[in-house]
Image (cartoon, grey):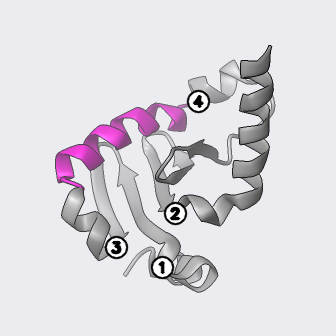
Amino acid sequence: MPGADLVQYLRDRVGNALRGVIRYHQGTADVLYLRDDVREVRLQSQIDRMLSRLEPESHSAEEEAFPFGDLYVTVRRFEKAIIMHFPTGNNRGVAVSLEPETAHNLNTFTTECLQQIHDE
């Protein structure tokens, strides 16, 4: 199964903190892994809506806007999840959802930055 190596790697690294892995290509989504409790609360329409927000990052215009070379990954930190998006070409990529505690250093750093921003 395509993506099985990635799912196994992630499960080995983060265990049950892995929430989901989805690969998309030109508007179609292939759910490679979805933890049971996440599957119960996430409808396909919600997954499609999230992917529609991520997919534009896989276009070359994103890299043109930021002249730093190829875009490897974007990371979004939410209260209840970390979303990593790996664009792999035009209209193609992989989205990985993790529990927030997997990014402890990122959480601490961004929380401290937010405190500085709100204190100004």
Q: Which mark is residue 35?
A: 3
Q: Which marked residue is nearer to the observer: mark 4 or mark 1?
A: 1
Q: Position of residue 109 (x, y in %)?
A: 79, 45
Q: Residue at x 18, y 45 (%)?
A: 45
Whichever of labels 4 and 2 marks the residue nearer the N terminus, that label is 4
The vertical placement of 4 against 105, above or below, is below
Q: Amino acid at mark 1?
A: Asn
Q: Amino acid at mark 2?
A: Glu
Judging by the rendered image, the residue that carries numbered circle 1 is 16
- Tell me how far mark 2 sits from mark 1, CA to CA: 9 Å
Q: Which mark is residue 113?
A: none
Q: Position of residue 105 (x, y in %)?
A: 77, 56
Q: Amino acid at mark 3?
A: Arg
Q: Residue at x 30, y 62 (%)?
A: 30
Whichever of labels 3 and 2 marks the residue nearer the N terminus, that label is 3
Judging by the rendered image, the residue that carries numbered circle 4 is 60
Provide the residue span drawn in magenta: 42-59
Q: Which marked residue is nearer to the observer: mark 3 or mark 4?
A: 3
Task: Please tell me whether mark 1 sits on a helix, a strand or a loop.
Answer: helix
| Mark 2 in CB contact with mark 1 (< 8 angstroms) | yes
